[in-house]
Image (tube, rainbow, N blue to C red):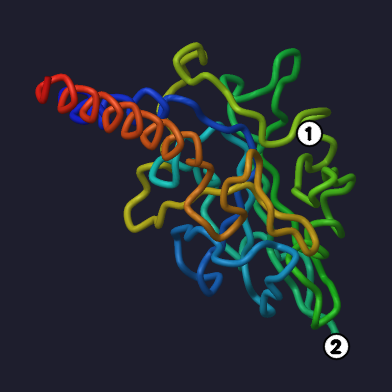
Amino acid sequence: MAVLAGVPAAAGTAHAAGYRYWSFWEGGDGKSATWAYATQGPAALRPADGAVNGYRFAVSTDGADADRPRQAPDFAAICAGTPAAPGTKRVALVVDFGVPADAPAGEAPPGPRTACARVAPDATAAEALAAVAAPLRYNSQALLCGISGYPRQGCGEQVDTAARPSSPPDPASSAPGATAGAGPTAGPGATAAPDGATASGGRGPSLGLYAGAAAVVALGAAALVRARRHGRR
């Protein structure tokens, strides 16, 4: 029973492991000052004219702590210099490359960028991103790994957050009314995520936490059976 009671502690230890990846966000109707985690991947989402999409590169341990883009989703400001044109739609984009503490070894994040993509009416969010932030890099599971060449390598790799350098608090992470979420950003047609975790639209890579808890439960059950057998003797 003592082993079984240790499940929360074991889960907490597994929870310290995070993942380094691009997360995908929506800015409501383009007028809201807050971000909400996208419920569809960029390859599936077809944003309307006037929408704002955001991308943030960061290390996240679970959906509740995902860092959102640090710039507000302001369509009017981002697309002010891009007039509407017949037969197209405009999608504002905020690309936040994150902080140095979350960067892969040997790399430094560029500063956040904004752009206004003018694309076909049926274009996906991924196509809008490609129009203004090339080159994009995907892995063999079609997960979005790099935007504008950053980072140069790696994709959704696991990170030991205990050994991760500290960084200043992220003001966007505590923005009033913002909806948290996490998950590796999927490329065209992708549903898989690193290490078998839920892809974009899920609650983030937490498979290790559940696997660790299950292992502890199994060990506890085995110990309990042995104790009962010993008692019968």
On the picture, is 113 further left or further right than 101?
A: right
Q: Residue at horizontal 62%, vertical 61%?
A: 77
Graded by Cα atoms within 10 Å as few (under 14), some (14 to 19) or many (20 or more), the crowding at tag 1 reads many
On the picture, is 11 further left or further right than 44?
A: left
Residue at image mark 1: 150
| Residue 99 lies in quadrant | top right
Rendering coords of residue 134 (x, y %): 88, 48
The amino acid type of the residue labelled 1 equals Tyr
Secondary structure at numbered mark 2: loop
Residue closest to the far right: 135
Which mark sits nearer the N-terminus, 2 or 1? 2
Instruction: State whether residue 182 is above or below residue 211.
Output: below
Rendering coords of residue 84 (x, y %): 78, 79
> Label 2, label 1: how many angstroms apart (C-alpha)?
33 Å
On the picture, is 87 further left or further right than 211?
A: right
Residue at image mark 2: 86
Q: Residue at horizontal 65%, vertical 47%?
A: 193
Graded by Cα atoms within 10 Å as few (under 14), some (14 to 19) or many (20 or more), the crowding at tag 2 reads few
Looking at the rendered structure, which numbered label has been put on residue 26? none
Rendering coords of residue 53 (x, y %): 63, 61
Foreground residue among 136 and 121? 136
Secondary structure at numbered mark 1: loop
